[in-house]
Amino acid sequence: MGSRKHNSAEKRKEARKTQYIARLRNVPTSPRKMRLVADMVRGMDVEPALGILQHSPKEASERVYKLLRSAIANWEVKNEGARIEDNQLYIKQIMVDSGRMLKRIQPAPQGRAHRIRKRSNHVTIILGNRNQEAVVEEVNDTTKENNNI
């Protein structure tokens, strides 16, 4: 592997250490309904988002709640000994992508048939830490100032 590829691979590896990801695949709910729930919690801190999801009447909110708990557990594995209360975890990114579509036939009058599309989706949650990102931004600002001098 060349040095350029090696360096970019190392950067990606370091970036993954600070990302906390959880994925839910092939959820038998339409992506449109799941996006309504995802939009409720996008960009929020973790604790209030858990409360909103827990008390939401939508079926999709239960699935997103469990996925968010899984993302928090992934954060705890990477940060042993750290407390969630001390860190400002938030939902950095939440994506709802279309999954596989099952096509079924609904009989219709006069010998016709209508196609039914049973949709599914994939949900991805990426958590971020506001404390770590603030430190990184300060370091980037000081390096830019030093380069401009």
Image: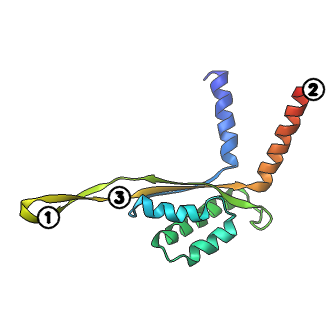
- Mark 1 lies on a secondary structure that is strand
The correct choice, above or below, for 87 with respect to 141 in the image is below
- Pointer 3 local density, CA inside 10 Å: few below 14, some 14–19, many at least 20: some
**Residue 4: percent from left, percent from top:** 66, 23
Badge 2 amino acid:
Ile
Residue 28 as seen in the image, left or right of residue 76: left
**Residue 120: percent from left, percent from top:** 38, 58
Q: Residue at x 67, y 71 (%)?
A: 48
Label located before the other in sequence (3 or 1): 1
Label located before the other in sequence (2 or 1): 1
Tell me if label 2 and label 3 are in contact, CB under 8 Å: no
**Residue 98: percent from left, percent from top:** 42, 52
Label located before the other in sequence (2 or 3): 3
Task: From the viewer's side, name the closer residue of 27 and 52.
Answer: 52
- Pointer 1 local density, CA inside 10 Å: few below 14, some 14–19, many at least 20: few
Viewer-side label of 3, 1? 1
From the image, tell me which residue sits under label 2. Answer: 149
From the image, tell me which residue sits under label 3. Answer: 119
Q: Quadrant of the N terminus?
A: top right
Q: Residue at x 93, y 26 (%)?
A: 149
Task: From the viewer's side, name the closer residue of 137 and 115.
Answer: 115
- Pointer 2 local density, CA inside 10 Å: few below 14, some 14–19, many at least 20: few
**Residue 127: percent from left, percent from top:** 65, 56
From the image, tell me which residue sits under label 1. Answer: 107
Badge 1 amino acid:
Pro
Badge 3 amino acid:
Arg
Quadrant in the picture for residue 56: bottom right
Query: Distance of mark 3 from mark 1, alpha carbons?
Result: 19 Å
Identity of the residue furthest to the right in this view: 149
